[in-house]
Amino acid sequence: MQGVVVRALLTVMVVTMALAMPAYARDWWGAGEGRVFPAVADFPNEHGTLRVLLQDGPLDTRGHPFFEPLGPHGRACVTCHQPADAMSLSLASIRQQWQTAGARDPLFAPIDGANCPDLPHGERDSHSLLLDHGLFRIARPWPPRDHAGKAIKPDFDVDVIHDPTGCNLSPRWGLPSDDPHVSVYRRPRPVANLKYVLAMGFAIDGKRGLPLPLDPDTGKPVSGNLMADSRVLTLKAQMHDAARSHLGFFERLTPAQIERINDFEMRVFTAQQQNRLGDSLDAGGAEGGPAKLADSEPGRLGSQGIGVWSEFAPWERADDSSVTPERRALRESIARGARSFRERTFLIADSRGVNSPMGFGNPMRDRCALCHNMSQMGMDVAPGQVDLGTTTQPFADQQPHLPLFRITCKGEPHPHYGRVIHTHDPGYALTTGRCADVGRITLQSLRGLAARAPYFVNGTASTLREVVEYYDRRYSIGYTEQEIEDLVNLMSAL
Amino acid sequence: MQGRFWRFVAAAVLVNVAVAAPAEQQIKPVVEQVGEEVRFITCPIYRDTDAGRKSGCWLGDRRETGTRFDITGSPTKPDWNHAVLVEGRVVEGDTQQCGGVLLEPVRVSVLHDQNCTRHMLPAEGFTGRRFSLPTRNIRPLYEPRELPKPPYQEKSFDIPFDFGRDYIVYQLSDYYIDKAVKYAIDIDASRVEITGYAATTPTTVSGQTLREPAELALRRAEVAREWLRRMGYPLDRVKIRAQTKAKVSDMEGADGLTEPSRRRVTLRVIP
């Protein structure tokens, strides 16, 4: 009897470990390794091969501020923006790093690599959000400050309803402290293909009924598509934010350092290059992979030009007899997924940013490409702050491991949620101070997805299938098994 | 066997009739005349037609007369959780797309402080309206555009608004304000005078008294000023004013509708 239990336990452990361990070793790039960043690098993942391109040739990273540790934690930008993970950071890599290097690895620095900095360092439980969900702590000042640093008077109150990390009620780190902050927990966003993130397709932000926001430094308009909550408007402002918050580097980055980081960030492109059958995503007339991405004009609207993911249209009738039936079937599935992304309609309701205040109506019938509308990239051409519901009740999946805030609107109620809102991450509202912005999260790029699970700002979708299943629940789409499979195959090929 | 066959045929015919029904049915106004301008408050109904993206239908029942109107054409479409103020002109047109008497032009203003129970009808054989890009839209930055040629004229631009709102309506108001601001910048205007209007004089609609708050006039003017600022026009050359009890105007953006023509901002651009 006992033997059975032990054996059962052992099996469970083996299975759990197998799940926790990546299928193959990830190529970890540690801070200050001084490697040469090659012009082309390929990295395997469960869906095939990711390719990272560095335009204008290789880069010696010795002394380079993106790669060298800055500040007291021994971290560099590359610590959380790994080439093998499409310049984001996968949960698989985080777990591998915990297993091979342990809690002393700079990745797990308590400042944001623990659930709260005052938890006992090194214990797994203190780092559970990072190890289980791939989430870093992001501390936002409360009340918010605008992009020029001026305090904003918010039109809502925040109360902490549930605080599993202890950080929001902490007298040192939380709302009761002398320097009050709201702690939310987020996934890193990919630092690649940034010309698309910065591109301005239109001069206006239709979701606010105003022209694009202005960079307070230069007075010039910017895309408004950086970070989940748009708290910075330029790469430069982002660098200062990252240096302080993630690296603990409180000196100002020098103009030369800023220039070098900027230069690297604007040259790096990434996308999946091969599917899981080893078939190149730019074979047979298709135009997947990062080369096309690096060469194309950014910021174009798919519905008035090159259709989103039309890269794969030549595969709709993959009659190439030189490919195996298995490869042909996968090509066709990817192409069907692309068409579904552009054409399969469903009812989108109660999503602030599209259903209001824009006059599209609530509900509206539209497609994935309504929001993910930028050619080649699948982000939003306009500033993409949309409330998909990933962080806010009742649409958010259960996430008892995350803090829950009660937002009470003091002026006009929220058009979809009413006066009182429960959210795990108020998103854009932490930047604007407006209750109408609660739950709005900036759309990410959809490139390199295969290499950087889990997905959504809070990592609630651990696989691409779970992404589609979230949409299926959220908007009652009623996808067939085939449709789900096609969308998953498409997304794993981006 | 034969009996089953006939039952099958009968069922098929019945199904056909059910599907075809709307096409046969005459949808006519109960009381209203073609050409008449109507104004009413109601809870909107969404009809889930599907002719591709953005092809759903919006209906509004005018309770005073029992007429069901097709209000889909409004630049601002309803929110099924809130009442709407409908303002439009009765026209003869295709009633088979959505299943209501057509209003064209039509404006819908969402009344956020009045809740409705959401209601959705199935397509019931109606086709819906295929989406086509509204003619009043802002072009992307990457498209070349023509600059005005001297000698420059003084020009006035009117920007329409929904009832009670200062939001620049997408693919309507933005089209006009973008033109105004670009003109001011292109000709390096010496002055821009903004006047914000609010329709503060009470009117009675569907048994309710409607009036816009006085401070809305200034808020609308400030939104126009913010457009000038963000697009790079120097604010020391901008004068702003607010005016309540707004009068009817001949603003193009109201498409000849009386009450909507009061709710506006005017930008006078002086070379």
Image (cartoon, coloured by chain):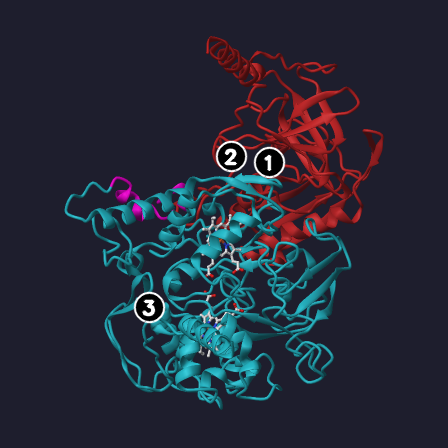
Q: Is residue A309 magenta?
A: yes
Q: Amino acid at mark 2?
A: Pro
Asked whether the beta carbons under mark 2 and mark 1 sit within 8 Å of each other, the answer is yes
Chain identifier of the residue bearing label 1 in the image: B
Q: Viewer-nearest of labels 2 and 3?
A: 3
- The chain painted cyan is A
Image coordinates of residue A146 in percent, x first then y, are 62, 68
Give the residue pinned by disc 1.
B75
Q: Considering the numbered disc 2 on the image, is that residue within a helix, a strand or a loop?
A: loop
- The chain painted red is B
The residue at the point 81 percent across, 29 percent down is B206
Q: Left or right of A390: which side holds B263?
A: right
Q: Specify whether residue B1 is in view.
A: yes
Q: Which mark is residue B134?
A: 2
Q: Amino acid at mark 3?
A: Val
Mark 2 neighbour class, 10 Å CA radius: few under 14, some 14 to 19, many 20 or more: few
Which is more toward the observer, A295 or B212?
A: A295
Which is more toward the observer, A372 or A108?
A: A108
Same subunit, labels 2 and 1: the answer reads yes
Asked whether the beta carbons under mark 2 and mark 3 sit within 8 Å of each other, the answer is no
Image coordinates of residue B110 in percent, x first then y, are 70, 40
Mark 3 neighbour class, 10 Å CA radius: few under 14, some 14 to 19, many 20 or more: many
Q: Amino acid at mark 1?
A: Pro
Same subunit, labels 2 and 3: the answer reads no
Q: Specify whether residue A203 is in view.
A: no
Chain identifier of the residue bearing label 3 in the image: A
Above or below A200: residue A475: above
Magenta span covers which residues?
A302-317
